């Protein structure tokens, strides 16, 4: 049935240090973008995260491209300097440095 069609998905995955978690793999089918589906997925993920985790001991961050900064800002994410990248993401940022140097930024949110 069309009412059960998968339109998009995302995840918040724990990073190996226990404090940091990454909002990752957010995707919405191209023909269903600009209808609020991505925003609904992010809100659901962040709300669920807040229900299950202590905000004083656990935070959500993400690596993203410059063109998507304005999408994530309303959810409380902000750009941080490279020196402020959470330790578990430093390798990921370094591994993608060619792309990140041109297009990427890191956002972090204390949840």
Image: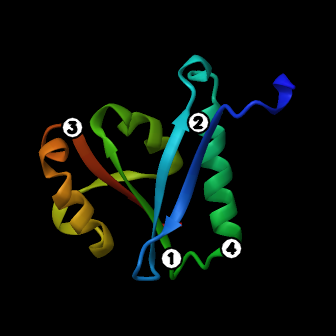
Tell me what residue is drawn at x 17 percent, y 67 percent: 83
Q: Earlier in the sequence, mark 2 or mark 1?
A: 2
Q: Earlier in the sequence, mark 2 or mark 3?
A: 2
SS class of the residue under badge 4?
Answer: helix
Discs 4, 1 touching: Cβ within 8 Å: no
Tell me which numbered mark, 4 or 1, is placed earlier along the sequence.
Answer: 4
Give me the C-alpha separation between circle 4 and circle 1. Answer: 10 Å
| Image quadrant in which you'd find residue 68 | top left
- Marks 3,1: beta carbons within 8 A: no
Q: Which residue is mark 2?
A: 38
Expressed as whole percent of the image width and height from the top left, the position of residue 81 reads: 20, 58
Q: Which residue is mark 3?
A: 103
Is mark 4 in CB contact (under 8 Å) with mark 3?
no
Tell me if label 2 and label 3 are in contact, CB under 8 Å: no
Badge 4 is on which residue?
Answer: 52
Give residue 58's mark.
1
Counting residues from the start of the chain, the first of labels 3 and 1 encountered is 1
Residue 103 visible somewhere in the drawing: yes
The image quadrant of residue 72 is top left
Residue 55 or 6: which is nearer the viewer?
A: 6
Query: At 48% from the left edge and 56% from the top edge, which residue is drawn?
Result: 23
- Quadrant of residue 49 within the rendered picture: bottom right
What percent of the width, then of the height, locates residue 42?
Answer: 59, 47
- Mark 4 or mark 3, which has the lower sequence index? 4
Taking 108 as reference, is 6 left or right? right
- The nearer-to-camera label among 2 and 1 is 2
Residue at 16%, 60% (x, y): give it. 94
């Amino acid at each position: 049935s069309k009412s059960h069609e998968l339109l998009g998905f995302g995840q918040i995955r724990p990073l190996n240090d226990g404090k940091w978690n990454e909002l990752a793999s957010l995707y919405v089918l191209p023909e269903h973008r600009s209808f609020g589906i991505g925003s609904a997925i992010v809100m659901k993920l962040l709300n669920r995260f807040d229900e299950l985790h202590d905000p004083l001991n656990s935070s959500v961050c993400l690596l993203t491209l410059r063109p998507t900064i304005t999408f994530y800002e309303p959810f409380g994410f902000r750009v941080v300097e490279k020196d402020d990248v959470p330790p578990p993401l430093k390798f990921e940022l370094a591994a993608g440095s060619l792309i990140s140097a041109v297009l990427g930024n890191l956002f972090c949110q204390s949840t």
